[in-house]
Image (spheres, grey):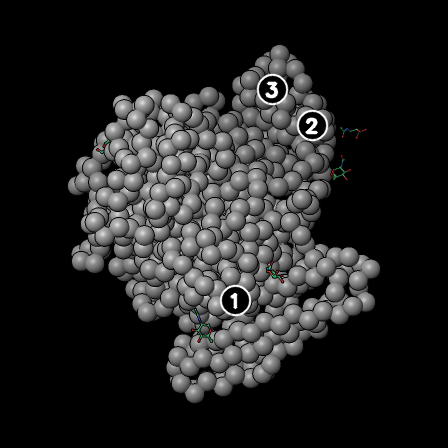
Amino acid sequence: MHVKRHSSTMATPILKGGCELLLIVSLIASTFANSDTYIIHMDQSAMPKAFSDHHNWYLATISSISDTAESTFSKTSKHIYTYTSSVHGFSASLTKSELDALKKSPGYIYSTRDRQLKVHTTHTSEFLGLSSSSGAWPAANYGEDMIIGLVDTGIWPESESFGDEGMTEVPSRWKGKCEPGTKFPSSLCNKKLIGARYYNKGLLASDPKIKISMNSTRDTDGHGTHTASTAAGNYVKGASYFGYANGTARGMAPRARIAMYKAIWEYEVNESDVLAAIDQAIQDGVDILSLSLTVATEDDLFLEDDSIAVASFAAMEKGVFVVASAGNTGPNYYTLVNGAPWLLTIGAGTIDREFEGALTLGDGNHFSFTTVYPGNYSLSQKPLVFMDGCESVEELKRVRDKIIVCKDNLSFSDQIENAASARVSGAVFINNYTSLSEYDTRSSFPAVYIGLQDGQMVIDYIRKSKDPRGTVEFRKTVIGTKPAPRVDGYSSRGPFASCRNVLKPDLLAPGTLVLASWSPISSVAEVRSRSLFSKFNLLSGTSMASPHVAGVAALIKKAHPDWSPAAIRSALMTTADSLDNTLTPIKDASNDDLPATPIDIGSGHINPTKSLDPGLIYDATAEDYVKLLCAMNYTKKQIQIITGSSHNCENRSLDLNYPSFIAYFDSDVSESKKKVVHKFQRTLTNVGEGISSYTAKLTGMEGIKVTVEPQKLAFKKKHEKLSYTLTLEGPKSMKEDLVHGSLSWVHDGGKCVVRSPIVATSLTP
Ligand SMILES: *[C@@H]1O[C@H](CO)[C@@H](O)[C@H](O)[C@H]1NC(C)=O
Ligand SMILES: *[C@@H]1O[C@H](CO)[C@@H](O)[C@H](O)[C@H]1NC(C)=O
Ligand SMILES: *[C@@H]1O[C@H](CO)[C@@H](O)[C@H](O)[C@H]1NC(C)=O
Ligand SMILES: *[C@@H]1O[C@H](CO)[C@@H](O)[C@H](O)[C@H]1NC(C)=O
Ligand SMILES: *[C@@H]1O[C@H](CO)[C@@H](O)[C@H](O)[C@H]1NC(C)=O
Ligand SMILES: *[C@@H]1O[C@H](CO)[C@@H](O)[C@H](O)[C@H]1NC(C)=O
Ligand SMILES: *[C@@H]1O[C@H](CO)[C@@H](O)[C@H](O)[C@H]1NC(C)=O
Ligand SMILES: *[C@@H]1O[C@H](CO)[C@@H](O)[C@H](O)[C@H]1NC(C)=O
């Protein structure tokens, strides 16, 4: 059970439209012609010598089990994809009896039914401290030559964000290509957009009648164009959303390259296609993979049933850094997805930018309000009229040339609907919401939302004045608002139920109202029933947060080409900011702006400049993750499905060398007198100067005794490794849900701080 913590405040609903693209799998598979699509895991070492490659072995296996009755199906039409890099195996359309026969075939390990996945910046670079004069951009040469792969809705290749001015020749190590398709000749790729591929065979296998209107990597939705330009978009001057967020747009790594793998088809997406996309991205040679989609069910999955986890294990082994969004189903505990310990899980935060309008009364009184109303308006010195609850459309129609003022505590949405259908020229809604939903602020007519106190001033003015008038203006962008960042309500929260011993999420990055490029054929808003289009769109979601991190990871990898995915992760986490721009702990927008915990924000908010020079790193190898799976009591078979190879579990350890700590305590109060001790052993690698020493600094945790041994680490040379032990001693059961603190290794010369959050919790899924 996921206890809702914040019953009094509304979580910000995610915008309608493309931003709900965090994918959720439903386990209901369709039954077409009594066949279903299955993803089949095979033991590669069991391939008979007679076969030249795995693909031919799989085809032969399918043909050997084919139902003779169904002679209309050839062996190739049953086969959908062969996977070599994400999972070992293939997907195929099989009847029940064929599947049963397959299960007896040599090399068969495991199969799952294909699943349906439900489909879930200008200023952000400055907010993150990226500038051309100093810091991460010049230090990492803007991510030059790094290749960021995205699995998404495709890309709009003509967007200026994907222009290749200033880009060097495509590196010869790149094996990807630009597959031609509908309205997408391969000539549309360039030195910025170096790969474009599309996957819909799985979708078509489950429904051959489905119409694919754009059978190519071209993005008809906008989401993929948005995420790709956020990660690595080139510079575009004069970008804005109808005047909001105006400025120069660019991605986090403006000189990195983009490879788009389209597997989302107008909200339709199948696991078999997503696996094929990741499979190819690994083979093509991407450096970074950004995934704003997930396989998630109502149930907590074992990791071998989470195909994003399985495919990203293979990617990690090949040195590909995988970043994935945490989900948009916050703010309750245990809502997080994509939490496998070998990938980086990203939550979404706000930035220090707000969009406003202004209402000025005839008496000079002035109110500002939050809005992203995109349309035209002419509301200068218009008569104001108070219409109480705005219950009657007929009455509203009679005053439609004026600015109507509505106040009622009953049905806010009905008032908006009434005002819209009466086609009033403008409306002021007085309401008791402390924070409006983003959906409301994207109104389809000029709408002003103000609180009860300001609203009373407007009503008093109308009552007192002989000729009450008001002026309404929109399209104001305010920079430098405080506090920022905050974790936004929709951002999914940890722990990750399928792997509770690793603290998730890892990091917070900008996710709310992010401006980035968009598909110009996909409507961004509706004004008076007319669809509006734009080359840029403002979107909110953890989908927007993960490409920010993908771009920064490209900067780190450019600066440190030999670092493992775990080293890059450690650099991002240990340098993250735990304080906001008021220099107090980052707050939770869904919890009355009280301080957030590491279950909400992980190590904190990404700090690109610091992440390039972390001093020390927590490294980990594929073997370390295997030891973790062994200690979680995963079977040999489960581990083989995840890792693609067999392991004996000689060594087991729940204590992964991770840059954060989480310990579980009981909640049963009768046990509160007993003591319990949790020990963590960690190893730090010196990636800074040769000789350097660090001193441990702990922040206290109520009711828990925290100690570290040794308290000093003196490194004599670069790449040297030193270990320490962190001990938490507390009552067997805790009174609180969660207490947290931190361990920082502070460089004795003050050069860097290597910080890790520590959580002690009694939360259960
Ligand atoms: C889409 O294009 C591919 C490659 O050109 C082709 O094999 C496939 O049949 C096409 N699918 C549809 C539905 O048009
Ligand atoms: C955005 O537009 C406003 C009004 O036109 C202007 O004052 C401001 O300087 C612009 N901001 C940027 C970053 O260009
Ligand atoms: C593939 O996805 C579509 C739409 O998302 C869904 O209707 C279909 O059931 C899925 N196919 C399978 C085999 O699950
Ligand atoms: C707003 O005005 C501009 C310029 O006249 C026009 O191009 C645009 O279509 C108008 N927008 C709407 C929503 O009517
Ligand atoms: C609406 O406001 C009135 C007066 O303030 C109050 O008596 C009533 O309970 C409110 N109704 C709701 C549904 O909040
Ligand atoms: C406004 O909302 C708050 C919290 O929901 C409530 O306590 C307060 O009574 C409301 N005020 C009015 C005037 O309805
Ligand atoms: C794994 O199994 C052992 C032996 O049954 C048990 O002691 C341990 O608690 C289990 N570990 C986990 C993480 O469930
Ligand atoms: C298990 O640990 C021992 C001792 O550290 C080591 O020698 C051995 O290679 C490890 N085995 C595996 C499979 O990692």
Q: To which residue does mark 3 refer?
A: 418
Q: In this rendering, does residue 132 appear at all? A: no
Residue 288 visible in the shown view: yes
Q: Nearer the viewer, residue 603 or 536?
A: 603
Disc 2, disc 3: CB below 8 Å? no
Nearer to me, 706 or 88: 88
Tell me the tag on residue 652: 1
Given residues 697 and 46, the one toward you in this image is 46
Q: Disc number at residue 407?
A: 2
Q: Is residue 492 left or right of residue 319?
A: right
Q: Where's residue 204, x and y in %?
A: 33, 29
Q: CA distance from mark 1 to mark 2?
A: 63 Å
Quadrant of residue 705 within the rendered picture: bottom right
- Name the residue rendered at 62%, 26% in the picture: 413
Closer mark to the observer between disc 2 and disc 3 = 3
Mark 3 is surrounded, within 10 Å at the Cα level, by few (under 14), some (14 to 19) or many (20 or more) other residues, namely some
**Disc 1 versus disc 2: nearer the observer:** 1
Q: Secondary structure at mark 1?
A: loop
Is residue 330 shown left or right of residue 166? Answer: right
Residue 143: x and y, percent? 31, 60
